[in-house]
Amino acid sequence: MILASGSGTSVALSLAAAAAYAVPAAASSRLSPRGARWALLAAWLLHALVLAWALLGDSPRFGFAPALSVTAWLVLTVYAVEREVFPQLQARWALAGLGSAAVLLALVFPGTPLHPSASALLPLHWALGIASYGLFGVAVVHAWLMRRSERLIRQAAEPQAGVPLLTLERITFRFVAAGFVLLTATLLAGLVFGERFYGRAWRWDHKTVFSVLAWLVFALLLLGRARFGWRGRKAVRVLYTGSLLLLLAYVGSRFVLEVVLGRPA
């Protein structure tokens, strides 16, 4: 827990980042676009400092909550870049709320100490996995925006996102495809790492099973899109299912180990 493992600096940085995120999340209607953009940028930078302190400091730690925190930061990074291309994209308040919650969760559950790696494959496996989490997280955000636009169109209202529905759909599947490539690389790196250090390709634990199931669901989604033109509600449901399985693979497994069972992974 936080009082047992969090330093004063990490606590201060985390609280500052969470408070900065809360400004555009809670007062989006009262902030000018410029003010909201600067508030979100300040929160994003503070969040980056929190992650750097946790992962690169004297006592690096990692777990289910830091994984969610890194994922949220990556999603916000992609959103900030994408806003330069599509200024009409409007998800600032929701993502700011997500960032604030992720920072606070990682503050309460900082994870377990990281030990020096015996192989360069392990950091590669970890980095690929977190990057795939981030890309699928971005895909989920776009799918949510897509569904919101569809509802507004059916209600004869102007879509709040301001981005054409077909454009949102195309971007969503691009992120799914990119995430699928990284997830495939993650599983292959895990296979090589397991073969080298454990004498078998995979340990068929909950993390591996859920990861493979998520890979199969995403493969089905991309195949259905390419062969049968899946789109709209059906595609979004399959995306949500695969993302939930992927979330359970690492975050769910680590949550059970760290919080429910109270032992390191």
Image (tube, rainbow, N blue to C red):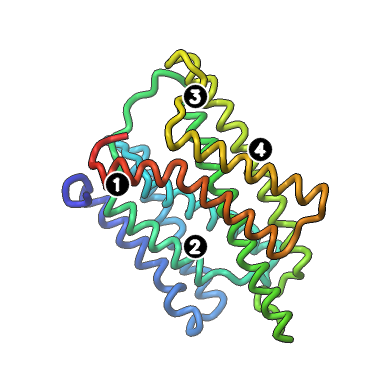
Q: Are there few (<14), some (14-19), or many (20+) residues within 10 Å of tag 3?
A: some
Badge 2 marks a residue whose secondary structure is helix
Q: Which residue is mark 4?
A: 181
Residue 171 sits above or below residue 198 on the image: below
Q: How far, Cα to Cα, is label 3 from label 1?
A: 27 Å
Residue 212 sits above or below residue 248 on the image: above
Q: Residue 110 bears which disc, if any?
A: 1
Residue located 47% across and 66% down the image: 96
> Of label 1 and label 4, which has the lower sequence position?
1
Q: Residue 202 bears which disc, if any?
A: 3
Q: How far, Cα to Cα, is label 1 from label 4?
A: 29 Å
User: Which one is in front, 241 or 181?
Assistant: 241
Q: How far, Cα to Cα, is label 2 from label 3?
A: 41 Å
Judge from the rendering whether residue 216 lies leftward or rightward of residue 41; answer left or right: right
Q: Quadrant of residue 85?
A: bottom right
Asked if the residue under mark 4 is in contact with the one under mark 1, i.e. CB atoms within 8 Å, the reply is no
- Mark in the foreground, 1 or 2: 1
Q: Quadrant of residue 88?
A: bottom right
| Amino acid type assigned to the residue bearing label 2 in the image | Leu
| Amino acid type assigned to the residue bearing label 1 in the image | Pro
Q: Which residue is mark 2?
A: 41
| Amino acid type assigned to the residue bearing label 3 in the image | Trp
Asked if the residue under mark 3 is in contact with the one under mark 2, i.e. CB atoms within 8 Å, the reply is no
> Of label 4 and label 3, which has the lower sequence position?
4
